[in-house]
Amino acid sequence: MLSALIWLPVLGAALVGFWPGLSASRARFLALAVASSLLVWTVVLFSQFDISNPAIQFSELFPWIETLGLNYHLGVDGLSLPLLALAGILTWIAIYSSNESVERPRLYYALILSVNAGIVGGFLAQNLLLFILFYELELIPFYLLIAIWGGTPQRGYAAMKFLIYTAVSGILILAAFLGLAWLSGSSTFDYKAIITAGLPLTTQLILLTMLLVGFGIKIPLVPLHTWLPDAYVEASPPVAILLGGILAKLGTYGLVRFGLGLFPETWALVAPGLAIIGAISAVYGALTAIAQKDIKRMVAYSSIGHMGYVLLGAAAATEISLIGAVAQMVAHGLILAILFHLVGVIETKVGTRELDVLNGLMSPVRGLPLTSALLVLGGMASAGIPGMAGFVAEILVLQGSYSVFPLPTLVCVVCTGLTAVYFVILLNRTCFGKLDNNTAYYPKVKLPEEIPALVLAVVIFFLGLQPTWLVRWSESTVAAMVATVQIDNEQQVAAVEAPAIER
């Protein structure tokens, strides 16, 4: 079942890219058919998933290169399952919302499907080397998607910056994985075979730091974020949806899966620093977003702030905070997707993204009323208004983290208010007010162009009103992970206290 989620988009990319004489419309139709099939298959996977079982399910294990310890080992649990659904939805949204007259359509859709295969493979990989292979698979496709279909002449610079940062991220993670396997004496790189308990504390800290920096670049966290504004702004809206919606989640997933999962006893030592970095990221993202004049750049910086909540929840490592961190990954992906899509629609119809130029888009006659209404909804969801998915995720993170890190949590509470500030600025300047008398009628937005935003709005509302569907999948897995961390911490405390008792 899991291999189909990887190899179906690979097969689709090959068909789209190499089918002779395939027209642009047929290439788009074939890519949409593959994305729709992936969504259906993901629903089947959800229907057969046992939410009471915290272990890896639907495991697939085939020997590959045994001399290197590389096995084709896939599996899914409550940590990765919600992210699979997010990847399926946003891939479909990205393909559907792409311009029907996009240049080089066969290459374009083939690259998007390849990105999906790489990211989904990363979520499913249960072998460290296999994870690295999938982790790097999306590197070149994203580089090409930004460099070829970006918006301005600066797209080449943004793509190269993304390539360099992501390559460094992969090198650090690979080095940490190699050190883990060799120093622990494991003959395989399978996740369950790696035991770090016997390693010296200094060695564990070095390896964990390499993972934190590597995945911190991918998320990205302050101060490793400088590639994000350029890449997000230069990428076309569908590619920006994939970048912020699911690629960043590969970083947060890796942080929890391999950082917290492999170093439970060392995590407590770095957790206070991670909580502070999460709070700094939240403050920096919010304040920088307030200062922006480009609405797409404003949304890009807001992403940095919201990733800080995920880091805070992971650092606290309580059951509620980790469930909230997983929920925040999903909610942030959905909210960022609707915002990037609507910003793209506005730029296409109005011809600008500048706050000082945009006004009165809510006008029912000359403006873009439905687009503006959906943008208001997206801003409210990002600000954590109750009744939407963003509120559920943020309240769980803050509630679960306060008892462990009260000060960083209070800082993040303040940042929720700052989020409302910059979205009020955005909405006030773009949607409200009156159009100038000299402003012509803007082109009408056709209903098919609004379908991606409408679908995302329905999902955001549904998960906000029925939060059980957002958190129920990860509860058992997170509970087991937290129990492991607590046991390791108790053993560490006992080992320190035993000599004192003897004396």
Image (tube, grey):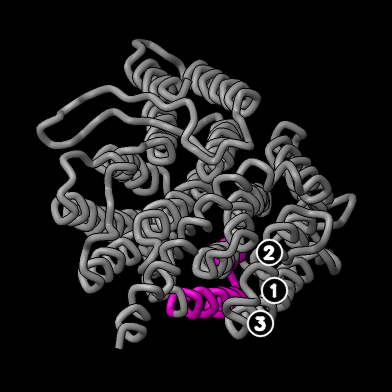
- Please provide the residue range marked out in magenta: 273-298
Could you tell me what secondary structure mostly forms the magenta stretch?
helix
| Secondary structure found at label 3 | helix
| Secondary structure found at label 2 | helix
Task: Judge the density around disc 2: few (<14), some (14-19), many (≥20) Cα neighbours within 10 Å.
Answer: many
Residue 262: quarter of image: bottom left
| Secondary structure found at label 1 | helix
Residue type (three-letter) at the residue carrying disc 3 = Leu
Tell which circle, 3 or 2, labels the residue nearer the N-terminal end: 2
Disc 1 and disc 2 in contact, CB within 8 angstroms: yes
Indicate whether residue 254 is drawn in magenta.
no
Q: Position of residue 224 (x, y in %)?
A: 37, 70
Q: Residue 77: in sight, yes or no?
A: yes
Q: Where 212 falls versus 8 (above or below)?
A: below
Disc 3 and disc 1 in contact, CB within 8 angstroms: no
Residue type (three-letter) at the residue carrying disc 1 = Thr
Disc 3 and disc 2 in contact, CB within 8 angstroms: no
Q: Where 490 falls versus 323 (above or below)?
A: below
> Which residue occupies 26% across, 55% down?
173
Q: Position of residue 117 (x, y in %)?
A: 40, 32
Mark 1 lies on residue: 416
Image disc number at residue 410: 3
Mark 2 lies on residue: 394
Residue type (three-letter) at the residue carrying disc 2 = Glu
- In the picture provided, is 197 more to the left or to the right than 482? left
Indicate whether residue 281 is drawn in magenta.
yes
